[in-house]
């Protein structure tokens, strides 16, 4: 794994904030690797237990025909009631209507949410409709790097 300390240093201040962290980019640019690095750093620095981390990769065949309702029920059933849960949702754009699920989870539960997706499929108007004022994208993070 290629370490990306510059990206990580810019993302970490947003850990445990109410913002949904959205990492976008072209295919194979390292979004999933950055998620793994965030998980590792959160475990080390925040003393987070494995049970508090939910990590899903939605480009897997396991989730190919998953509906929005199934996604919601799956995640809701795994969210801890007694501690903050950290959700890492890789390639979430594979689930149609994901924005509404993420908005609901962010509103109703003690969660910290990180998602990835390709540029072309993540820049829909649905993000701004459902997550207005609740998210920060990699584009904003990139500006922070300058």
Image: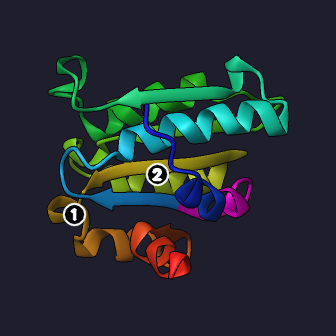
Q: Name above or below for residue 139 compared with residue 105.
A: below
Furthest residue toward front: 2
Q: Residue at x 45, y 74 (%)?
A: 142
Q: Which mark is residue 95?
A: none
Image-quadrant location for residue 58: top left
Query: In this rendering, would 120 be left or right of 9?
Result: left
Asked whether residue 17 appears in the rendered view, the answer is yes
Q: Which residue is mark 2?
A: 102
Q: Residue at x 66, y 45 (%)?
A: 111
Circle 1 SS class: helix
Asked whether residue 109 appears in the rendered view, the answer is no
Quadrant placement of the N terminus: top left
Q: Residue at x 29, y 52 (%)?
A: 117
Query: What colouring style does the render use?
Result: rainbow
Circle 2 SS class: helix
108 or 9: nearer the eye?
9
Closer to the camera: disc 2 or disc 1? 1
Q: Which residue is mark 1?
A: 119
Query: Could you tell me how far apart the alpha carbons at marks 2 and 1 are, in whole angstroms?
Result: 18 Å
């Amino acid at each position: 794994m290629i370490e990306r300390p510059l990206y990580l240093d810019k993302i970490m201040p947003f850990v445990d904030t109410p913002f949904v962290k959205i990492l976008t980019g072209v295919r194979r640019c390292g979004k999933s690797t950055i998620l793994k690095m965030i998980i590792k750093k959160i475990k080390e620095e925040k003393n987070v237990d494995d049970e508090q981390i939910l990590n899903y990769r939605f480009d897997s065949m396991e989730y190919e025909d998953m509906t929005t309702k199934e996604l919601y029920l799956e995640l809701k059933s795994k969210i801890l009631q007694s501690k903050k849960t950290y959700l890492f949702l890789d390639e979430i754009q594979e689930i149609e209507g994901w924005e509404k699920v993420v908005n609901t989870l962010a509103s109703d539960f003690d969660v910290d949410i990180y998602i990835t997706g390709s540029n072309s499929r993540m820049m829909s108007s649905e993000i701004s409709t459902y997550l207005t004022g609740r998210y920060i994208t990699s584009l904003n993070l990139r500006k922070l790097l300058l």
